[in-house]
Amino acid sequence: MKAVILAGGLGTRIAEESDHIPKPMVEVGGRPLLWHIMKMYSYHGVNDFIICLGYKGYVIKEFFFNYYRHTADLEISLSTGDHRILNSQSEDWKVTLIDTGPETMTGGRLKRVARYLDNETFCLTYGDGLSDIDISAEINFHRKHGKLATVAAVQPPGRFGVLNMGEHSHVFSFEEKPSDEIGWINGGFFVLEPQVIDYIKGDETSWEQAPLKNLASDGQLAAFQHHGYWQPCDTLRDKRQLESLWEKGQAYWAVWDRR
């Protein structure tokens, strides 16, 4: 099975990082978000990736073009430039890198890579969200219900604490806003049939608008409820939180490396 990763957006909300690199190349634990996402899929047996490039896509191309050597032990002769690979730990991934345009919307990017999907069921996600979602279970769920599309439904943690106040501004309790008050939202991990491409008009189509709305109205969209960890990296605050979890050995999304 293939996984399509949308990696072409500008990432303006984390401009401190993405002014210089694409947002999926923002690093957590010394590795790009994109790498973490691919490791998540690989853990569930998905090793064939189609990456939709846009903003500064050449950075992602260079990362993968040099990945084999960057992850290997090398012996180099500085006088001749000759080198020898001593040991490589590169993942067994097939990576297809497609320039889908700098201004193309998310649905348009997916439509542009349709020819590479081989008319088979595929996964789709964004290049900035980390989770311990059971992708294998979502795929099995998708195959059983028979609809064209499955979206992972998540309940994001509340960002703000709730003050319970009485008379004279007395605070009698403080609690973090529980996630079940927020409701279920699009978690960004999809399993799709190739027919969903027919719901996308062109480059100007946002996947999250008409395609998903029309799939839902046609009875072709099902939700796989994920009750575990989920965190997008939208802001510098998010990045720092993810870094902290990684450094503490609490990177819940790193299902491939339960340290």
Image (cartoon, grey):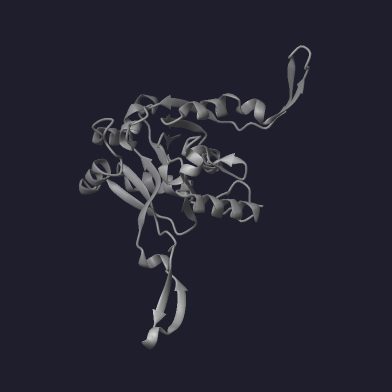
- Is residue 69 rendered to the left or right of residue 233? right
Side (left or right) of 244 relative to 8 = right
- Residue drawn at x 77%, y 17% is 78
Task: Pick the quarter of the image with the N terminus.
Answer: top left
In the displayed structure, would residue 184 be above or below residue 189?
A: below
Taking depth in this image into account, of 181 and 145 the one nearest to the observer is 181
In this view, the residue in front, 255 or 136, is 255
Relative image position of residue 51 (x, y in whole percent): 45, 31
Of residues 227 and 21, which is closer to you in this image? 21
Q: Position of residue 24 (x, y in %)?
A: 49, 39
Q: How many marks?
A: 0
Residue 132 visible in this rendered orientation of the protein: no
The residue depicted at 30 percent of the width and 40 percent of the height is 207
Query: Can residue 87 be seen at all in this image of the molecule?
Result: yes
Instruction: Identify the residue at image location x=26%, y=36%.
Output: 205
Residue visible at 48% across and 48% down in the picture:
233
Give the residue furthest to the top: 80
* Residue 124 horizontal/vertical position (percent): 40, 39
The answer to whether residue 180 is above or below residue 47 is below
| Vertical relation: 205 (above or below) 227 | above
Residue 115 position, x and y percent, is 35, 24
